[in-house]
């Protein structure tokens, strides 16, 4: 340990990319397949590694850094709020928490808000709320929850139990019982599954980790009607799709489907750990005092940042820009699909959450793009996912489209 430099010694000689990767591999838990890059600085839509190489970021911390990297207003907000009040716990009210709850409920059309630190925690709260609502209604008879195959809802035991990917379940059994999975978009199977034992149905408006898959036309609104008729709550997981990402304030607007419970994260903190569970009055009643909480969720520091971010993200003019840039980007990707039909099988998504489906594994293409200075990730084996900062501009989109064409052309 004697050769380690105290982390607060900012004027020390910087470590190289190779040094950071090597030391990280020795000291970090090996639970993530990390790309051998260590980023030390960000600015707008760009990231810089420890060796000074610049990358145009079309991943944005997995659809998280809505305003790009190191936006000055976030730094100033953190400084000001940290000097005023950081944490008091959920045993008390605080001003930014109340104001954020009012903003999100007013804009979403839901009634109550609970704040936590991650999307998985937001989904845990939604899971508990649905189960408790079903129990309060019909006792232990109504505690089942239905999810979709190829879905993703987080990594905690509850959230992973709701995730419809068997590869993520391996080695973690027994999972939380009472969860069923149905094919995404198949209303007929769902109708046969949702009975008087089902407390809730949880769906993503757009499958994220499942390959940027949109639901069939009319599907989500029909699911909501089915849940209402049969006494189940509909949970929409908008951790990835919410707050402007799809060119609407919330993705459920595209599908005319106001859920009973809505979960948000990622862009709500734009890199700062914040998440929210919004609920109708009927659903929210299930979580009475003492039934659920979290120590740091709703802390003034996080809430001040999220309040400013949400205010900016929900600005209609900002959302309109996202929609326009998303349409421009998608048209460019569709042009490449027509130009390289032997490589690309289709393009999907909304706003600035887009996927390009390839006819082979996508990982080699992400590596080639990274060599060219672009960060894109692969999902669902053969899909390139594009989730750039919402501040990305058309010139930067054009740079990526050109790079994609070069990569596809050298297949």
Image: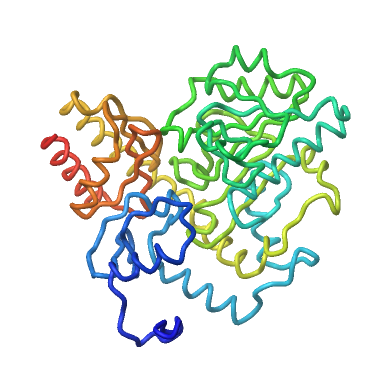
Quadrant position of the N terminus in the picture = bottom left
Nearest the viewer among 96 and 209 is: 209
Left or right: residue 132 compared with residue 61: right
Q: At x 81% / y 27%, what residue is drawn?
A: 142
Q: Residue furthest left?
A: 410
Q: Is residue 330 above or below residue 388?
A: above
Left or right: residue 106 compared with residue 80: right
Quadrant position of the C terminus in the picture = top left
Answer with the quarter of the image where residue 338 lies: top left
Q: How is the image coloured?
A: rainbow
Q: Is residue 128 above or below residue 388?
A: above
Nearest the viewer among 280 and 289 is: 289
- Number of dots carrying numbers: 0
Q: At x 52% / y 62%, what residue is drawn?
A: 272
Answer with the quarter of the image where residue 221 lies: top right
Q: Position of residue 120 (x, y in %)?
A: 60, 47
Q: At x 18% / y 24%, what residue is drawn?
A: 342
Q: Is residue 24 above or below residue 2?
A: above
Q: Position of residue 253 (x, y in %)?
A: 54, 34
Answer with the quarter of the image where residue 162 lies: top right
Q: Position of residue 143 (x, y in %)?
A: 78, 30
Q: Is residue 65 above or below residue 184?
A: below
Q: At x 71% / y 42%, what residue is drawn?
A: 279
Left or right: residue 286 compared with residue 1: right
């Amino acid at each position: 340990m004697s050769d380690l430099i105290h982390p607060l010694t900012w004027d020390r000689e910087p470590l190289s990319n190779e040094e950071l990767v090597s030391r990280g591999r020795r000291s970090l838990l090996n639970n993530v397949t990390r790309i051998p890059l260590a980023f030390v600085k960000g600015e707008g839509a760009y990231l810089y590694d420890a060796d000074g190489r610049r990358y145009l970021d079309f991943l944005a911390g997995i659809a998280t850094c809505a305003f790009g990297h190191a936006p000055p207003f976030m730094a100033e907000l953190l400084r000001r709020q940290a000097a005023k009040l950081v944490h008091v716990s959920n045993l008390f009210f605080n001003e930014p928490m109340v104001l954020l709850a009012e903003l999100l409920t007013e804009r979403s059309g839901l009634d109550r808000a609970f704040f936590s630190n991650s999307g998985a925690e937001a989904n845990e709260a939604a899971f508990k709320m649905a189960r408790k609502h079903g129990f309060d209604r019909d006792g232990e008879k109504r505690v089942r929850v239905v999810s979709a195959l190829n879905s993703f809802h987080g990594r905690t035991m509850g959230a992973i139990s709701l995730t419809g990917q068997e590869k993520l379940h391996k080695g973690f059994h027994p999972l939380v019982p009472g969860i069923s999975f149905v094919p995404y978009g198949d209303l007929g199977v769902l109708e046969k599954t949702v009975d008087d034992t089902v407390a809730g149905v949880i769906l993503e408006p757009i499958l994220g980790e499942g390959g940027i898959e949109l639901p069939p036309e009319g599907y989500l609104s029909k699911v909501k009607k089915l849940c209402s008729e049969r006494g189940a709550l509909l949970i929409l997981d908008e951790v990835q799709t919410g707050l402007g990402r799809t060119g609407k304030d919330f993705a459920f607007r595209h599908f005319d489907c106001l859920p009973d419970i809505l979960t948000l994260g990622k862009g709500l903190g734009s890199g700062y750990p914040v998440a929210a569970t919004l609920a109708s009055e009927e659903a929210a009643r299930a979580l009475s005092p003492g039934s659920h909480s979290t120590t740091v969720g709703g802390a003034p520091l996080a809430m001040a940042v999220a309040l400013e971010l949400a205010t900016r993200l929900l600005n209609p003019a900002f959302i309109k820009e996202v929609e326009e840039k998303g349409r421009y980007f998608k048209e460019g990707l569709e042009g490449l699909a027509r130009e390289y039909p032997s490589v690309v099988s289709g393009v999907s998504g909304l706003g600035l959450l887009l996927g390009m489906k390839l006819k082979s594994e996508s990982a080699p293409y992400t590596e080639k793009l990274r060599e060219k200075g672009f960060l894109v990730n692969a999902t669902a084996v053969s899909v390139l996912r594009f989730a750039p900062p919402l501040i990305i501009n058309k010139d930067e989109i054009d740079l990526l489209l050109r790079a994609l064409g070069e990569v596809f052309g050298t297949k």
